[in-house]
Structures are given as structure tokens and as C-alpha cells.
Amino acid sequence: MKIYEDKTRSAKERASALVAEMTFEEKITQLQNHAAPIPRLNVPHYEYWNEASHGYFGPFKYDKMDVTSFPVCLAMSQSWDPDKIKEVACAISDEIRAYHNIYGYELNDWCPTINLARDPRNGRSDENFGEDPFLTGKLAIKYVQGMQGDDPNVLKTCATPKHYALNSSENNRHNGSSNVDEATLREYYTRQFRDAVLYGHAQSIMTSYNRVNGVPASANEKLLTHLLREEWGFDGFVVSDCGAVSDVYENIVFNDIMNIQSDEKTTGHYYAKNLDEAAAISLSAGTDLSCGEEYQSPLVRAVKNGLISEDVINRALTRIFTVRFRLGLFDEEGDYAYRNIGWDDVCTAEKQKLCLDIADDSIVLLKNDDALLPLSKDDLKGKKVLIIGPNAIYRELGGYSCGSNRIDTTVNVLALDGIKNALKDNDTEVLYEKGWCCGKEFREGVDGRLPGADNESPDAIKRSREADAEEAAEAKELGLSIKQLSFAKNFCLKFMAPGYDYHNITDAIRSPKKFVTEDPDVRADDAMLFERALAAAKDADIVIIIAGTDASNASEENDRAELDLPYGQNEKIEKIIEANPNTVVVINALGAVTGSFFDKAHTIINEHFAGQEQGTALADVLFGKVNPNAKLTATWYRNMDDLPPINDYGIYRFDTVNRKGRTYQYFKGKALFPFGYGLSYTSYDYADMKITKDGSSEASSAFDANDTMVISADISNTGKYDGKEIVELYVSKVIPEDMHDKKPARQLKGFTKVFIKAGTSEKAVIKLPVSELAFWSNLKNKMVVEPGDYVIELAKSSSDIVLTKTVHIDGVWDAPLAAVTTEIDRTIIKTGETACVNTVAVALDTSRVLNAALRPVYSVSDTSVASIDANGLVTAIAPGTALISADVTYNGKTMTGTVPVTVR
């Protein structure tokens, strides 16, 4: 039995032994996302690129394509419910494992997206968990745990938090630099990645396209080695975003598609002199796997020319295959964890219910001035309810969603369907008017013309690629908009229906951005549609406007140019409200929006893209089956003037051009709706705030830096509806007036969700380790708990502080050990050769603790294979594979770093 076949060995040992069996040529084939098979070693083909942001989005080569499509992450984050987020991730990983067990689909999934929503114009706002690093970190931990499973021996799937790091603008991601100071980098932009790795134990990380402080993320040793591995203890593998290694030099594929000449090239960082150097720099810095082909012939040339050694390739492959062994991919004969997951675990009634539950808890009630909601079904008997807006019949599931193109979800409840279903036996007339069109613009062709469609077919839309003429989309329902398509250089778009001739478009695309078609009203007259809707509104008893955005307004590679609702919806909404004040405005958008109608509308609901059950969830809230309990996880600004340029990554107000700052932590203006905001059909009172030391019942106002505070309060439901209240805990450091300091106005440091029956009270309890109050110190080059006074706040939102107490913090934080990282300069050596092991030990405050007085204690699992001295010098003794361990004890805690070595 080969060592890599021995199930009793650790995943690291087996990976090292397997890599040692490979030829150089075979190794090269394993460094890209579509890794080739190595039949002689029983290594199958493997595709690392799969998506599961809010539901499995796999290759789907077979007829059965059922999956559950949950709300987008921004929507789910508004539930403020980490445990439910874990349930969702568990359900998604069930379906991924089912497809693996049945069809052999791979188990690496590039999710979740945990970049922060520090600017609502970002085209991928719907994919993240909001603007706050603390909340995002808590949700990311649970998402990763749900994806990877709870079995200590086998990973269920491999999560890949992305895009590391500072990547929340699409327009400049291939050529821009996200520049911030050290405190902002650590306290804000990377905090959530730290949590996903340190506490969620994510096994893979994806780099971003952009530069960070001038260095491309895929070539950034500080990010990939010093922070990720040494400070956070990451022991998985790093994959680049697709083509990001190429961007270290230039985006060759993009420039080719765009037909950009050499003197006009603007995509790429030109950090390297050529693609060979880009590959060598990126692999050396810690990007182990390339999504793309940069690690193929360019890397071969780089090795040949001495830019990089084969030892670095061995290190990367050992990391990659360690994860594949942890997934059980080489041990699939017989019984093993997750082997019995199959079709009975896909699209189950339980998953459908979970999908609806999280959608229900994602809807934010923004305004209810006249208590129009909840709508009473009894009051609507014999009445007319009018639904207006294309979003009512257009299913937008968000980025990387199953349900797009010809892949459909088993359950699909549109907003109009949900409302009709809720009123189907109620003797209520439900009417629909589209009101306007969406997704109408076509992008510019290579010859400068705007290709358009003059065929008026309303029934079907088909798209085919010249490359293989594969049908990729069919209009099976009203409101279809084709989105998120990738094309060859030439494409053909066909509008089809019985009795109509084809209308063909054969222009080449001038950019790789998404090509979005019109919905079925290809040549509809907006004015006529709106006049009809306005007339119907005047005659209705209740009007429900489903307004919002679609994939043509923003997406990957495409930020929003403005935050006002597109297609003239602001003005249209105002006119409808004037015609009928009994109007509910539902905003179905990828993120925050602005508009003058906010001051005129009395009733507004925010429903981000809420998955396959979005229509049912909306109806649940509208008609009171669910008392809205969600709260915003991103600030809604009043207008664009409140925002600095999107490419400006500073958040402190003096680090931004307009001096207003970003996010609730620093924004100095008045938000339209603040972070943490959300109304309910009931009302809550907060009282009797108390702060104690953990383990004591006595109130206290003085704490040591190593203590844990316990904050409690009585929350009373003073209304007539049962409800769930999210209690938010903020902390602000008291800064003397004569001292200039960059501390945030306040920071979220805890939250809890409490169910309270009408007319009763419950106690909300939140634990807060004082170490959570640490800030980055440029003087001490580490995180420090500063002594002084801090205000502890219990709040309904970041702008609605209900109860406060001031505490005094003193003492020095004795930070525990966070990570011990052990690396070896040569993972594969010959008998008699030596290799050097290096160990780094870092405390939670980022202090590097090893010194002359504190050294690691080394050992080898098999002393017949190799020996190691006190300085980490390894000597190869005989063929085999062994695991080298480095034990470090600091502040009473012992941790061990391990690295394999194979002797040939």
C-alpha cells in the first residue's frame, strides 16, 4: 500500500506522499481550476470552480437539475440569525454532496462572499452580508461551518470565502488599488476574513483582482502569508479569482476580448514584467491554485528560467491535496461520512420551509406611518388589490443563482403569485399592471453600433453561442430577463415565437460585461404601460408597487452609476401614490436605493432578492402571517452626495474626499435608514440594563482587559402582535475633546434575537469579552485594549440608542495564542539531504511571541524517516513520509503547528 493510500495517515502526510509520486509535468496539470487526471496514480479529473453563494450553482450536465435557491446573502444577513445561516449552509452542502454522490460533481465551492458593503453602488452588493465586519464575521463563521460540516475527520464540502481583500468596487478591480492605513485594514476590511479562518476554519480562500496598498492581492505576501497563515493559522489552500494572476501583469483575456491595442491597455496591474514573472510572484506569495491557465506554460518557463523553484510548487500542491484528502475524495469506497446523502436530501419539504423561514426573516419594514400594514384579508373581501411593476412577475435570484438560464428551481413563487395565493379564497379581485419595462438597454457592439431588437415577439427569447450553438435560455414565464451570460467573441441572440420571423444579432461584444435582454415586452411603450397602471391605481382599494432593480443595473464587473431606482421608477411611484395614498411600496433591489418618493410614501418594505420563496415571504409579511423582524445590515444614504468616490477605500471621514466618512461607524450625515434599522407591527420597550462580570451577579462599572462583560436588559412587547426583536449592542470609546482620534462613533460588538409574546417581557443577555474592544496601535504594532472609559449601548438601530452605561477599562490584555504556523522550505527531499523548518507563533493581539526565551519544541512522527534538531533543521534518514510538529506554549495555552516531509 502506498502511503497516500493509507487511511490511518494524516491528510497532510498523504498529500505530501502523493505529490512526491508526481512528475514535474503532472504537477503542472494540477495547479489550475480544471485539474487533469493522473490515471497511474488514481487521481481523477477535478474541477475546483463551483458556486454556492445561496444555493448550489454547479455544472449541471444531467437532466435532473433540482436545487434549493435561498435568498441572497445580503437578504439573509438582515435576519441577524447566525444559527439559521448555518442551517441554510448545511442545506446547501447537503445538495452539493448529493450531486457529488450521484454524479461525481466536485466539492469545492467558492463561497461565501464576505467583502463589506461599504458602498451601496458596488455591483455585487447582494452577495455580501452587509457593511459591518463584526456581524459579517459572525455570519461567515456559521456559513463556513455549515458548508464544511461538523465531522472532525471528513469535510462535507470545502468553503472558499472571497474575495480577499478590499474588493468592493467592480469598475476598477482589474487595474485599481484599494489603499488604506494599517488600522483600517485590520479593524475593518480583513476582520471578517480573520473570523472565517480563525473560528470557522475555512479550508480555502479566494484572492481578489485588485491591488491592496499597491500590491496585487494574488501576489500579496502580507495578506497571504503574514496575516492569513501566520496570524490566523490558515492551513488550507488559496485560489486566485479567475484571471487574477494574469492581472498581476495584464488581463490578457480581457484585452483580447475587448480588442484593445497595446497602447490602450488599461486592464492589469503591471506589477510583473510578464506573465511568467506574474505566475512566479503569485505562487511564491501564497496563491496556490490559479483559476486560469497562468500556472501552466508560464510557470514552466518560470521554473526553467530560475524565477521559482519546484519546491514552491510542491508546497502549493501539498496544501491543495491536503484539502482533497480531508474531503474524503480518495476514500470513497465503502462507508464514510456523508456517503448516504442522495436525492432524498435534495429539494425536500424541510429545505423549502427553511428557505421560506429565512426569506420571512429577511424582509425589513422601512415605513408604516399610517399602520396600513398588515393588510386585513377580511377588510379586503369584495375589494380590488392592484399589483404594479415588472419585478412582480420577474424572478431575480441574484448573482450565481440556480434558476437562471435554462436551469430552473423546483419551487418558484413570484411576488404576484405569492399575493394571489394568499388571497385566492378571499373574494378579493387581484389585478396586475406592468407599468414599465426593465432591462431594455443593449450594450455597444465592436463597430460602435447599439444592437437592438425590432421583432415584437412577446412569447419567447432564445440565446445561442456561436461556439457550440448550445441553447442556454428559454422564456418559460412572463418577465424573463436573460442575465449572467458569458459569450464567445461572436454571438447570436434570437427573439422567437410562433408566427414571427427570427431577428438575429451577430455583433461581437465590446466588453465582457453582462448582456441583458429586454423582458418579453421587447418593443413595449413605457408611456402606454404606465398610463394604464395609473388609471387602474385610481380605481383600486389597495395598490402594491413592486419596484426595484434587475441584473442590467448592476452585477459582477458592473457597479451602479446611481442609486435612484432605474427606468424612471421614482417619478412613477410618486404619481401612483398621489393617485392612491393606500399604496405599499416594495423595494426588490440588490442593495440600498435612493429616491424622492421615500418622503411621500407612507408604507415601504425592503425585500432584497429573497430566493425561490420570495413571493410567499412577501405575502406573509403583507398580510400579517409574519411580523417583520429583520433589520438593515447596510446604511441607506439619502443621496449620492453623501458618498465619496466608490474607488476611495477610506472610511474615516478625513480619509474620504467629501469628509463625511463611510458606514455607520464614521458617516457624519443623516442616513435615510441607518444600519440596524427595521420596524415591526408591534412595539418594544427596553429597561433595567445591567452589566456584570461573567460568573458574577453583581453589577459592575470597572473591568480588567481580560474580563468578560455580561450585559442584560428586560425587553417588553407592548403591542398586540407576537414578535422577534433584535437587540443590538454598540460600544464607543470616550475620547477627550482636546484629543484627535480616529476611533469610530460606535461599533457593533454584540446582538441577540429574542422572541417575545405580546404583552410579555423577556431578558436579553449578551456576553462581551473586553478584548473585543481592542484597536490597532501603530506605536506598539499590535492590537491593544486601551484603558479608559467606554460607553456600552443597547439599541434598536445604530441611530436609536435606548439604554447606556459607562464602564472603565484598565489593565493589560494577556492575549492568548491564536496560531502556530510551521512551514518547511523543501517538502520533498532525498536521503541524506536537509531541509529547514520555520515556525511562527502569533497571539490574538497579533504579537509574534517566539524569541530566544520561548522556542518551539520540535518532534517527528516517524524518526526512522527523518530527524529534526532544536533549530528546526530536518535530516532525511530513509524513504517515507513523516509529520513534523512544533509545540508552542504561551500564556498557558499550547498549540501545535505541523508540516509533512517526504523522503525519496
Image (cartoon, rainbow, N blue to C red):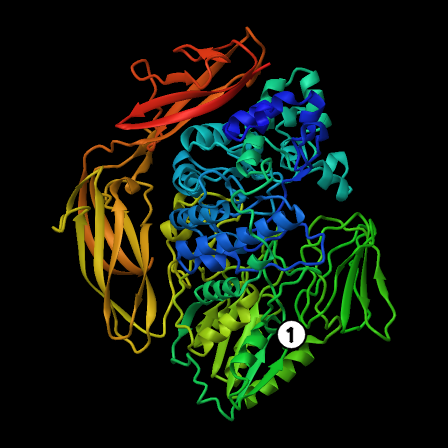
Residue drawn at 49 percent across, 52 percent down: 90
User: Which residue is farthest bottom?
Assistant: 382
Quadrant into which the C terminus falls: top right
Q: Which residue is mark 1?
A: 436
Mark 1 residue type: Trp
Q: Could you tell me residue 617's position as x and y percent?
A: 49, 70
How many marks overall?
Answer: 1
Residue count near mark 1 (Cα–Cα under 10 Å), binned few <14, some 14–19, many ≥20:
many
Q: Is residue 754 visible?
A: yes
In terms of depth relative to the viewer, which is nearer, 82 or 191?
A: 82
User: Which residue is farthest left?
Assistant: 698
In terms of depth relative to the viewer, which is nearer, 177 or 309?
A: 309
Q: Is residue 313 visible?
A: no
Quadrant into which the N terminus falls: top right
Measured along the vertical axis of the image, is residue 742 above or below residue 406?
above
Name the element at disc 1.
loop
Residue drawn at 71 percent across, 21 percent down: 301
In terms of depth relative to the viewer, which is nearer, 851 or 784?
A: 851
Would you identify the image quadrant in which residue 673 lies? bottom left
Q: Could you tell me residue 361's position as x and y percent?
A: 43, 65
In terms of depth relative to the viewer, which is nearer, 49 or 346?
A: 346
Measured along the vertical axis of the image, is residue 23 above or below residue 832?
below
Q: Could you tell me residue 891's position as x and y percent?
A: 26, 27
Q: Could you tell me residue 72's position as x and y percent?
A: 53, 58
Would you identify the image quadrant in which residue 401 lies? bottom right
Is residue 646 shown left or right of residue 703? right
User: Which residue is farthest front?
Assistant: 334
Measured along the vertical axis of the image, is residue 53 above or below residue 584?
above
Residue drawn at 63 percent across, 37 percent down: 244
User: Which residue is farthest top?
Assistant: 832
